[in-house]
Image (cartoon, rainbow, N blue to C red):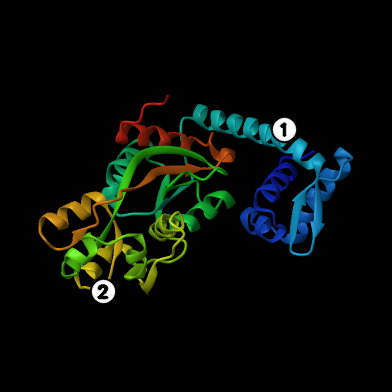
Amino acid sequence: MEMYQLRAFVTAATLGSVTRTAEALHVTQPAVTAQIKALEEELGVALFDRRPGRISLTRAGESLLSDAQKVLDAAGFLQGRAKELQGEVTGQLLIGTVADPDTLRLGSLLRALVAALPLLEIKTRYGLAQDLCEQVMSGGMQGAFYIAANMPRELEALVLQTQHYRIVAPVVYGKKFLQAGWRDLAQMPWIGAPVQHHIQTLLLALFARQGLAPHQVLEADAMAASDSLVRAGLGLSLLREDKAMELAERNELVIWPHVRVPAQLGFIYSRTTEHDPALVATLSQLRRVWGVVDA
């Protein structure tokens, strides 16, 4: 039994696809299939039911998955300890970002990491929340900032802060907006975001709870500028509360007073990499920068 066979098994179980597993592990699809088949032959049980376009775990596969994960975790811990004993951490750390650097306190984090790990090549990549989640799941990056109503169950997460979002509108909407009910709001023009963006996820879920859907007239891919589109009179939007309050005080937009939309800002990572020295250092510095105390 080889570690790469176990890794192929666990990754395929997580992603549910030989194609995506091959991409995540940077090998060919036939190689993934051969590795899983060899593991099945050695264990004497079928791990997957195979169907066109997808695979699913058998009962034996479900029973053995947690054990396989424990073996990989132990191996990762051993490798991490060995690197620590060597006295240096090298390689590349790729971190996904989902909001502006100030909101993430990114400068403080990167300054601490550069000081602590001078031999490590550190890179950041901006992306949409759900895209970043998939990249972390597939092993494309070690970790990423993430904003959603809740952290994804498939990954580990360090929750950093609870944020709130507000429904905002152009000043000219005035009294009509402030006195509107949910159905009235849904019928007004909305500035949306790409489907993978955390703002869009929060917006659709908010109206779905009322049995409604917002009338979206515009999709903006640069949601950092959504406040400028609202101020230009194009429609309603969700905006982070601190920014909304600041602009409302300057009479540049109006806030619907009847709801605050909560969301978690966190840092997500995979269990398979939690013992990696670079990720361990990243989580340690995140706790320091954000003042997070483990329960």
Residue 248: % across, % down: 15, 57
Q: In this view, does 126 lie above or below 60?
A: below
Q: In which quarter of the image is residue 65?
A: top right
Q: Where is residue 269 in the image (x, y as percent from the top left)?
A: 50, 43
How many neighbours does mark 2 have within 10 angstroms: few (below 14), some (14-19), or many (20 or more)? some
**Gap between marks 1 and 2 measured at Cα:** 54 Å
Choose between 63 and 246: the one closer to the eye: 246
With respect to residue 295, does 68 lie above or below?
below
Q: Mark 1 points at which residue?
A: 67
Pointer 2 residue: 234
x, y (%) of residue 189? 32, 72
Mark 1 or mark 2, which is nearer to you?
2
Nearest the camera: 102 or 120?
Answer: 102
Q: In this view, does 108 lie to the left or right of 28?
A: left
Q: Which amino acid does label 1 sit on?
A: Asp
Task: Find numbered disc 1 in the image and state the secondary structure of the residue it sits on.
Answer: helix
Which mark, by number, is residue 122?
Answer: none
Q: In which quarter of the image is the C terminus?
A: top left
User: Looking at the picture, how far across and down is residue 272, in whole percent?
Assistant: 59, 39
Q: What secondary structure is marked by label 2?
A: loop
Residue pictured at 40% horizontal, 32% vertical: 284
**Dot 1 alpha-carbon crowd within 10 angstroms: few under 14, some 14 to 19, many 20 or more:** few
